[in-house]
Image (cartoon, rainbow, N blue to C red):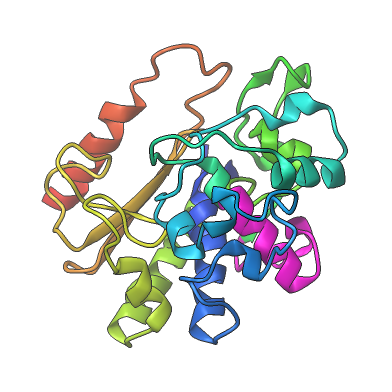
Amino acid sequence: MTRETWFDLASLTKVIFTTTRILHLAVVGTIDLDAPLTSVIPDFRQQDMSAWERQVTFRQCLGHQTHFPATTPLYIQGLSPHLLRTFVLQREWPKGESVYSDMNFILLGFALERLMGEGIRDMNAGPGFAFSAPPELSAATEQCPWRQRMICGEVHDENCAALEGAGHAGLFGTADAVLDFAAGLLDGDAKGDPVVQMMRQPLSEKRAHGWERRYAGWSGGDDCSAATIGHTGFTGTGLWIDFERGRAWTLLTNRIHPTRHFDSGIFDLRRQVGDAVCAS
């Protein structure tokens, strides 16, 4: 691995790509974060106009304050990307406790597609980012039982692959690209950028808009300031930004290679890296 290695950033897509774009649309007045998703996706659960899903707002999705399940294997439906979107929008979802859920950002991705008039994979991924990468320059992820091949340079997340682009996963980038993004947020915070200010705005004890806030035992370690936000990705990625100290760090690994079914030690490693960075 080198600084030029491309990584499947997995759920860092949620904060680097989707959150940033949703908050920008809110700042310019295109959407109201406290309006329901149906303000952009009016056909969401259209067979039951009183369905709880129709009341879910953009802000609730950003803060994982909805009642969707943490994850669900959408890809087993075997549907085309178009029909799979229809399945997601018309399915009667079980109403459970509020948990961190990929569904929140899958739906935010659908909203972006409606507003932009194009699929996520056709959108500009941002400076230094892409929705696929050259295999010869990429860190391989997992031997996929579903696709029956080693995944390298294409999205690992099965639901994102089946949807052919989604708001919860699919972004690729290098360590420099991730840190350049973080540097942009630090600079924007110093200049009073309203998008960055909303990213930092608390929505709960552990969450801001899209991001996690520092809390006891979290992935960023114990030595960062209370003004730190961060996020991790299933493939072994992570990004943390300490606005009080003006520093950011990323840890990019392929911790699911060649399989997710072993203890990689990533959870302790992330905290140790955070503490080491903050102590330097």
Q: Quadrant of residue 110?
A: bottom right
Estimate the x, y position of residue 140 in percent, counting from the top left.
Answer: 63, 30
The reply, left or right, for residue 250 in relation to residue 76 is left
Q: Which residue: 70% across, 63% down? A: 41
Q: Residue at x 76, y 56 (%)?
A: 121
Q: Nearer the viewer, residue 259 or 83?
A: 83
Residue segment shown in magenta: 105-128
Relative height, residue 189 to residue 22 (above, below): below
Q: Position of residue 77 (x, y in %)?
A: 79, 27
Q: Is residue 237 above or below residue 206?
A: above
Report whether 250 appears left or right of 12. Answer: left
Helix, strand or loop for the magenta stretch, by majority: helix
As drawn, is 16 to the left or to the right of 141? left
**Residue sitting at 37 percent across and 67 percent down?**
199
Q: Is residue 107 magenta?
A: yes
Residue 55 spot, x, y in % from top left: 53, 58
| Residue 106 is covered by the magenta coloring | yes
Instruction: Please tell me which residue is depicted at 79% across the width and 40% down the height of the picture.
Output: 84
Residue sitting farthest toward the top: 262
User: From what the image shows, is residue 208 above or below residue 157?
Assistant: below
Q: Nearer the viewer, residue 251 or 260?
A: 260
Say which quarter of the image contains residue 269: top left
Q: Position of residue 147 (x, y in %)?
A: 78, 22
